[in-house]
Image (cartoon, rainbow, N blue to C red):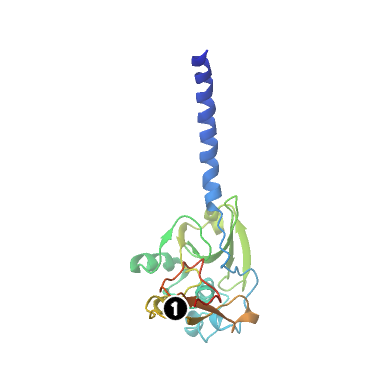
Amino acid sequence: MAKKKTLLIIPIVIIFTIIISALTPLCAWAEDDENYQPRLTAPNSSISYYSSEKNRYFQTGTPMPNCVAYAYGRIYEMNGEAPLIDHGSAGDWWFINKSNGYYEYGSQPKLGAVACWSGHVAIVEKIGENGSVTISESHWGGTYFDVRTYADMSSHYGQRFYGYIYTYNGGLSKNLENRLLSAKKETHTQYKQETINSPEQENEFSIISLDSNRTVTSKRDMIISNLVG
């Protein structure tokens, strides 16, 4: 009798394992970052990240509508510092990044990542629990800005999909990160970092503090307006 029960349990365990394995990748794709502010509406052309003031592509004669000009501006906007990739066409970005080691890259979507095809780039703004990816983009010689959701990124205009460049730094610029890490051991040490949540809040700042033990919290859990002392 015990042997029969064991024989019945084994198939059930195997089936359960298969179901869990099938669902896990889908769940792993979903990503939630409370610090990330998705752009789902068109940026105003006067915003510095998308204009001649800061946008390298605009400065060199290829402003929006243009997918690389938009991607450059969006990275600048969400990170608060100039992107490391500042030249090349859409089809070049994947290889420029890979050969120079600017950013990590891979096949899994992440918020703020640049999605790269053989002739197009876009920014990942949302990731659904079912694995769908919502991107924001611009099109050379065409649409200034749009937002689309894809279940299969490889189907985008029939182009070859290369993968994702992980450009989003969690809202902590390298400049601020270096200042925090090299700060003296003092209480009430404060730094200001520009926080862009919307065009209307372009000049808004948030206070980030360093505790008395000279420890810096993770990018996700950085202390906001809580002074130690």
- Name the residue at 57% across, 74% down: 141
User: Is 8 placed left or right of 213 in the picture?
Assistant: right
| Residue found at the far top of this picture | 1
Picture coordinates of residue 75 (x, y %)?
Answer: 50, 73
Residue 166 shows in the view: yes
- Name the residue at 65% across, 81% down: 200
Q: Nearer the viewer, residue 115 or 218?
A: 218
Helix, strand or loop under label 1: helix
Picture coordinates of residue 48 (x, y %)?
Answer: 55, 84
Q: Which residue is mark 1?
A: 176
Label 1 crowd bin: few (<14), some (14–19), many (20+), radius 10 Å: some
**Kind of residue at badge 1:** Leu
Q: Quadrant of residue 214?
A: bottom left
Q: How many marks?
A: 1
Q: Nearer the viewer, residue 220 or 174?
A: 220
- Name the residue at 61% across, 75% down: 197
| Residue found at the far front of this picture | 229
Residue 44 shows in the view: no
Picture coordinates of residue 27 (x, y %)?
Answer: 55, 49
Q: Nearer the viewer, residue 137 or 82?
A: 82
User: Is 178 placed left or right of 29 in the picture?
Assistant: left
Q: Quadrant of residue 126?
A: bottom right
